[in-house]
Image (cartoon, rainbow, N blue to C red):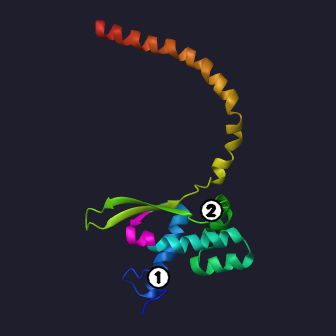
Amino acid sequence: MKHGRKIVKLQRKQDHRDALLMNLTCSLIEHRRIRTTLAKAKALRPYAEKLVTLGKRGTLHARRTALSSLRHKDMVKKLFEEIAVASKDRVGGYTRITKLGQRRSDSAPMAYIEWVDAYVPKAAAAAEPEAAAEPVAAEEAAAPAKKKAPAKKKAAAKKEAAAAE
């Protein structure tokens, strides 16, 4: 009887399946969204979400457990420092699967799997102080908008002059 055995086998042996899920998870962590078959996305979801739960714990034991299943130090670091931090308020459901339709070659159902809480990379986090100064920029943007209107009239005048010739 198969009570309590919910693992998706993906027509692979265990070693091959573990390597596949590890590589898919590393790609998901690195690129934030990957395109894969629907079956692989559904198999990847519990694997990736358990790793985010480890990342939210943040302990040394959790980091070593994640390292034993991912085997890439930089991916574990990114998981713990960026993805888990972005998902700290969420209780579960860290990933989203979006169906895309069928692949042309073999009609396999395709899907995107991505993180629900899109984390902000460090380069974009430096731009956030500029966003705080946005109300002042909005006032300045209103004034140049008045200046841009005559520019459009000049462009229209040039088009009319070209049409007259």
Question: For the residue labelled by badge 1, is the local secondary structure a helix, a strand or a loop?
Answer: loop
Q: Amino acid at mark 2?
A: Ile
Q: Where does the C terminus fall, quadrant-wise? A: top left
**Percent from the top left, x then y, of residue 13?**
41, 87
In this figure, which residue is indicated by the disc labeled 1?
6
Tag 2: Cα neighbours inside 10 Å, few (<14), some, or many (≥20)? many
- Magenta span: 35-42
| Quarter occupied by residue 103 | bottom left
Q: Work out whether mark 1 precedes mark 2 in sequence or the reverse, and give the earlier one.
A: 1
Q: In the depicted view, which residue is nearer to us: 37 or 53?
A: 53
Q: How far across and how far down the image is residue 49, in percent?
A: 57, 70
From what the image shows, is residue 101 above or below residue 15? above
Q: Report the side of 53 relative to 115 (left or right).
A: right
Which residue is disc 2 drawn over?
83
Q: Is residue 147 magenta?
A: no
| Residue 56 visible in rendering | yes
